[in-house]
Amino acid sequence: QSVLTQPPSVSGAPGQRVTISCTGNSSNIGTIYDVHWYQHLPGTAPKLLIYHNSNRPSGVPDRFSASKSGTSASLAISGLQAEDEADYYCQAYETSLSGEVVFGGGTKLTVL
Amino acid sequence: QLQLQESGPGLVKPSETLSLTCTVSGASISSGTYYWSWIRQSPGKGLEWLGSIEYRGNTYYNPSLNSRFTLSVDTSKNQFSLKVKSVTAADTAVYYCVRQEQWNLDFPFDYWGQGTLVTVSS
């Protein structure tokens, strides 16, 4: 059971907009530390999609956006394309215990 | 371009020790303030951070795991390694070696190896 909660699956038709939530608590997302997002295509290594809450690495289309508020974060994908079908993970820093990296359980995006 | 490549056995017997090595190319493991880390994904499950090490040898482990995991670094070979003692079927997973941007566990993982599947079975 993951510390960060994501919906197991979301879906949308090409061209539509979908959002993926990542819910934590006051010891992880609700702290000063940032949330990061990864896209994981089958058979490949996960790829950094969004860093420090809302920043896109070079090469990531501006169709991808993200934000953080309180103890939650969200990833939005607009203008959905077939190639966006993948698993998406959020990452945060857990300040309880001695500090650790935590991930959400992942969300499978299906493009209908 | 920085590249990370995992190597190690694809099959390990229960109760034995799993050893994986990550070879870094395109940059020196000793340059910059990066954590070199291991993340795994068990079949049908999400990502799990195992631990991180920096070139001076300081280590950080997932406190939610037991003490079976050990990280080490060999700067002369530009490699870092993971050992998992007394493996069970629950350790079957794809293991990724990754770089974390700064000497801060709250930073993102910006470079990933392709991953290596390790199966624990007799």
Image (cartoon, helix red, strand yellow):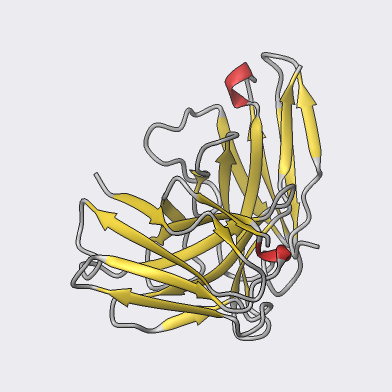
Q: Is residue A92 above or below residue A108?
A: below
Near-viewer residue (B117 or A10): B117
- In percent of width and height, residue B43 lies at 71, 49
Q: Residue at x 51, y 67 (%)?
A: B106
- In percent of width and height, residue B16 lies at 59, 74
Horizontal placement of B3 versus A70: left or right? left
Q: Residue at x 69, y 67 (%)?
A: A30
Near-viewer residue (A53 or B44): B44
Can residue A81 be seen here? The reply is: no
- In percent of width and height, residue B40 lies at 58, 58
Q: Is residue B95 above or below residue A79?
A: below
Can residue B43 be seen here? The reply is: yes
Q: Is residue A52 above or below residue A8?
A: below
Q: Is residue B95 above or below residue B80?
A: above
Horizontal placement of A112 versus A80: left or right? right
Q: Residue at x 49, y 49 (%)?
A: B115
Horizontal placement of A68 versus B27: left or right? right
